[in-house]
Image (cartoon, rainbow, N blue to C red):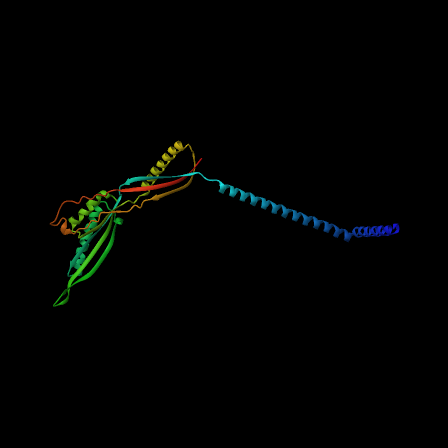
Amino acid sequence: MALLRNKKKGRATKKSSALQNLCTSDMNTFWCDFTKKLFITFFGILLVYIIIFFGTLIQNNMERFSYIKYENQQQRTVRLQAVGSVIAQPDTATISMGVISEATDVQVAQAENTQKMNQLIARLRALGIASEDIQVKEYTVYPRYDYIEDQGRVFLGYTVNQEVYIKIRDVSKADKVVVLAGEIGITKVSDLQFLLQDTDVYIAQAREEAVEKIMEKANTLSQLLGVDFVNIIHYNEYEDHVSPRSTGVYYETEAYGVGGRTEKPDIQAGSKDIRIRVEMVVEIN
């Protein structure tokens, strides 16, 4: 037995000596160092990946926990509404005025029509209406025919129709513009409308009134319920449509200023009620 153990010990000693001899040479020493460095580098990379993996896992669990915790919290809110309104006066008027001329000669019809329209434009300019506020809306020339039983279609002459669109920026002059129809012989007046060009000012006033009403409600509820309003969660407002107010004036010259009634028309621009509905959702504590 002792002899067997000595043989095994001798073999181990020879192997250890052989490994030492292998590493002692220059080439073997290089590969030993390279293997050690490679192992250390691999181990370091593996350690970094393990740290990143567990760090990401912990962060995701924390975010999930925070999200679930937020969802479980019941937010206390109050919905408040109020309406603000402002009465606005129209600041602009628009109207259409035109002349229809008839003659057997087209040039005569056009000359008569042009004369009256030039006279109308001159009077409008005298009232302080700018040229850019007078726009030709329609100009047509067409022949007129009649049907006679014995003769068939008979030529009667030509009709010239010219109409202008007028913007009146001073609404107090609207009745003076309408009066021109009877004074000049304008045969067509229509579509008188009173408009609000600058609605932003009135909308801002209505909004401010609505918000003030909501703040008053909030203060009252705060005292009654014993809560504090800490944050506005939601805000929305609804604006009523501001539609033009139409007077719909239409008459022929024969009914005004030429053998008919001579009193001047009393045209009222009226007013417009602008309403803004404000809605807030407020967090309470």
Compared across the picture, whether 284 is left or right of 199 comes to: right
Q: Position of residue 6 (x, y in %)?
A: 87, 50
User: Where is residue 54, by image quadrant?
Assistant: top right
Q: Position of residue 68 (x, y in %)?
A: 51, 43
Quadrant location, the C terminus: top left
Q: Position of residue 7 (x, y in %)?
A: 86, 52
Foreground of the two, 140 or 9: 9
User: Where is residue 110, by image quadrant?
Assistant: bottom left
Compared across the picture, whether 9 is left or right of 253 comes to: right
Give the residue displayed 25% in from the left and 54% down from the top: 137
Is residue 168 visible in the rendered image? The answer is: no
**Number of numbered callouts drawn:** 0
Q: Position of residue 75 (x, y in %)?
A: 45, 39
Foreground of the two, 25 or 248: 248
Is residue 43 visible in the rendered image? The answer is: yes
Foreground of the two, 227 or 256: 227
Compared across the picture, whether 13 is left or right of 69 comes to: right
